[in-house]
Amino acid sequence: MIDAFVRSLLGTWGNAVLDFYLSNHFWINAFVLSYALLIFLGRTSYHRSAKFLLDWLEKKFAADAKAKSRSGLVKLIEKEEIPWGPAGASFWFPLITPPGRFLPSLKNEHTLQKMFSKDALVAILYPAKEPKGKSKTGRSP
């Protein structure tokens, strides 16, 4: 009875899609689960690489007075060679997915340089402050 009711709401194309799903549900669910696992491991790879780079920045420039400001830190980073190889090796998974994206990329030096530019590293280390009187929802408190 429920099947007949649902099928009456779906229409011709909806019934065809439902029949296809019912006949191939194992493979469709396996694909969706594998993709979700791929994105999860890619995000974990991104966060581990970011943590490695931030730890490197803090260890390298903790004693330097210029590192206390955003512009001073950018100048210090430009003078140093960022360890892209160890940052990529901080997690075993060969793909990386930044937050907000759902397409994984191959984890190599070029990809890491694009994702973690000097400005991006400074923005992660010193997040921009919200204007006073604004909350995350955009309403005043």
Image (cartoon, rainbow, N blue to C red):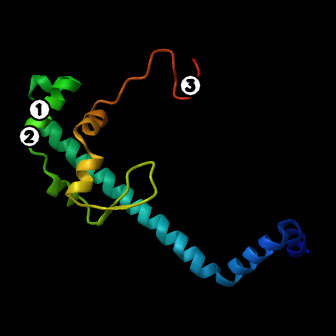
User: On the image, numbered disc 2 is attached to which residue?
Assistant: 80
Q: Residue at x 70, y 80 (%)?
A: 20
Tell me the CA gap for discs 1 and 2.
Answer: 7 Å
The reply to whether callout 1 and callout 2 are in contact (CB within 8 Å) is yes
54 displayed left or right of 132: left
Q: Where residue 5 sits: x, y (%)?
A: 90, 69
Q: Amino acid at mark 2?
A: Glu
- When asked about the image quadrant of residue 61, the answer is top left
* Image quadrant in which the N terminus is located: bottom right
Front in this rendered view, residue 89 or 20: 20
Position of the C terminus, as image quadrant, is: top right
Residue in the picture at 11% in, 32% down: 76
Q: Which mark is residue 88?
A: none
Query: SS class of the residue under badge 3?
Result: loop
Q: Which residue is identified by label 3?
A: 138
Any mark on residue 76, and which? 1
Q: Residues within 10 Å of mark 3 (few under 14, many from 20)?
A: few
Q: Residue at x 11, y 22 (%)?
A: 65
Q: Quadrant location of residue 95? A: bottom left
For the view shown, which residue lies furthest in the bottom direction? 23
Estimate the spatial distance between the alpha carbons at disc 1 and disc 3, rounded to whole Å: 35 Å
Q: Identity of the amino acid at label 3?
A: Gly
**Which is closer to the viewer, label 3 or label 2?**
2
Could you say where residue 40 lies in the image, as x and y percent from the top left? Answer: 42, 60
Asked if residue 23 is positioned above or below residue 130 in the image, the reply reads below
Residue 38 locus on image (x, y percent): 42, 66
| For the residues bearing labels 3 and 2, Cβ distance under 8 angstroms | no
- Considering only vertical position in the picture, is 29 above or below 88? below
Identify the mark nearer the N-term, 3 or 2.
2
